[in-house]
Image (cartoon, coloured by chain):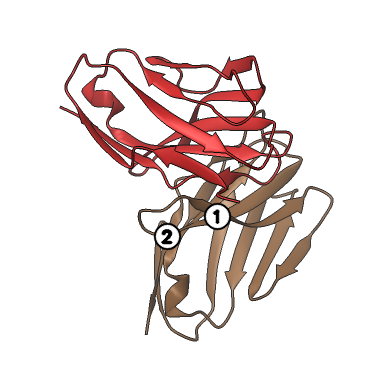
Chain colours: A red, B brown
Amino acid sequence: NAGVTQTPKFQVLKTGQSMTLQCAQDMNHEYMSWYRQDPGMGLRLIHYSVGAGITDQGEVPNGYNVSRSTTEDFPLRLLSAAPSQTSVYFCASSYSSGWDEQFFGPGTRLTVL
Amino acid sequence: SQQGEEDPQALSIQEGENATMNCSYKTSINNLQWYRQNSGRGLVHLILIRSNEREKHSGRLRVTLDTSKKSSSLLITASRAADTASYFCATDRGHMRFGAGTRLTVKP
């Protein structure tokens, strides 16, 4: 199993550009989530999904969109990038809920100029 | 807002020593988890302790939970240079909430 994969690993954007961060898992997990990690802030939940077709907002959803058309994929879209979105983004999945053991991807380091 | 708060923020010890990290939280929980993050990598799950458990072991790891004090501790015994990483506690208040972590450095 590849586990949780994320692409790209690094990305530089200009303010106002849009892009999609990809996340996929091959463990047939129902629950998937996106976090951002900023220095000294820990991980903060952006969006999550409890299954295909179902998504909901986390703590810091503004400026981000998600969709879950399949169990495997959970892309995160930045609609109009801002410098405040410079961060490291992690995708995670778990068997059935956000309270289970989370499996994390390797992260995407995003810089917005 | 962060639910778990780790203490200390940074810890530096010699190989072979024990490392203790603490986590405090504010509201009632069902379970508490500890994760490790090596530099530039994703988080890796270490151990989960439920609210009705007081202590749990996994190899060189020992986790305790005191729900009356709303705190948990992670003890790593006989530390190795490979234990150098950041350690996070996470609680299940609504969604999984992570603290800012303890950065552990183990010197060879």
Type of amino acid at the residue the image marks with label 2: Asn
Label 1 near label 2: C-beta < 8 Å? yes
For residue B78, above or below residue B10? below
Residue designated by label 1: B44
For mark 2, what is the residue? B38
Which amino acid, mark 1? Val
Comparing B11 with B45, the one in front is B45
- Residue B2 position, x and y percent, is 51, 36
Residue situated furthest right in the rendering = B52
Q: Residue at x 59, y 18 (%)?
A: A69
User: What residue is rendered at 41% in x and 56% in y?
Assistant: B9
Q: Do the residues at discs 2 and 1 belong to one chain?
A: yes
On screen, A29 above or below A76? Answer: below
Place of residue A98 in the rendered image (x, y in percent of width and height, measured from the top left): 67, 34
> A101 and B19: which one is in front?
A101
**Who comes first in sequence, dot 2 or dot 1?**
2
B40 relative to A73, above or below = below
